[in-house]
Amino acid sequence: PLRSYDSSDMNKSGCLEIFEMPKKNANGEIPYGRYIAGIDPIDADSGSSLFSIFVMDTFTDRIVAEYTGRPKLAIEAYEITLRTLKFYNAQGNYEKNLKGLFSYFDGKNALHYLCDTPQILRDMEMTKATNLYGNLAKGTHANKEVNKWGRLLQAQWMLSRHNEEDPEDLRLNMHLIRSLPYIEECIAWNSDGNFDRVSAMGMLFILREEKAKRTNIAKLNQDKKIDNITNDKFFNKN
């Protein structure tokens, strides 16, 4: 694993780090929707930019896995990503400015592991279809406003208390981050540099915000149930 943000003198292949194993329910299955991921992909087989994916447990709000590296071939990173998403039964949001990841997943009949373009971005008028060809349904088209919002969401999460229900637990979410290179990237971030882990986490937190919005809408709709014979206590008591 790349243990430092400055990896110029290292073997950049990297490896998958599992901080927490996927949790299973009573049926021995990993609940779909519990784990989400953010992906900053690469397209070319050569270059200095790193491929990065982070996986989050939405039940605990913790980062449970990371892969950051630059294999010899881009498809190696795509395969690592596919296996990671399968392992956690997770859905990932990715920067769709680059086309290679989508094509690889499409060829593997695995597009269901890539999230639809978040509706929240359209609602906030941060993104729109600028091309009339290629993939318009999956992932996030990264631009200045989208990336800025992704960094804001990361900062808000880092500075939030991890366990608000326990008044004696004063730890913030940033105290539980186990990726030191990610923290180094956050500290070193500037508008002129290349910060792949920050970009991947931006995609993750945009998806996290999309999931939270959908959950809130579902709760509101549930509270607005119309009273009729089908909602009678006789039918609902069980």
Image: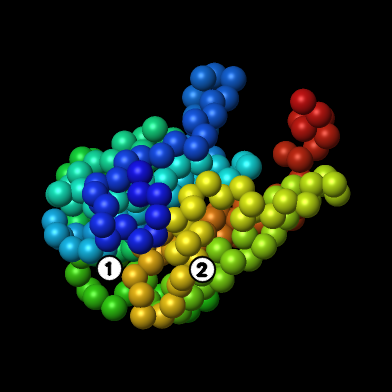
Is residue 86 positioned above or below 220 on the image?
above
Furthest residue toward front: 9
- Is residue 98 at least partly visible in the picture? yes
State the separation of the CA atoms marked 1 and 2: 25 Å
Residue that appears at 39% across and 32% down: 87
Which of the 4 image quadrants contains residue 229? top right
Q: Quadrant of the C terminus?
A: top right
Tell me the residue that label 2 is attached to: 187
Q: Which mark is residue 97?
A: 1
The amino acid on which the numbered mark 2 sits, given as a three-letter code, is: Ile
Q: Quadrant of the N terminus?
A: top left
Which of the 4 image quadrants contains residue 80? top left
User: Can you give x and y, in whole percent of width and height, for residue 9 in the image?
Assistant: 26, 57
- Is residue 150 at least partly visible in the picture? no
- Name the secondary structure under disc 1: loop
Is residue 162 positioned above or below 133 on the image?
above
User: Can you give x and y, in whole percent of width and height, for residue 137 in the image?
Assistant: 33, 60
User: Can you give x and y, in whole percent of width and height, for residue 140 in the image?
Assistant: 37, 65
Which of the 4 image quadrants contains residue 60? top right
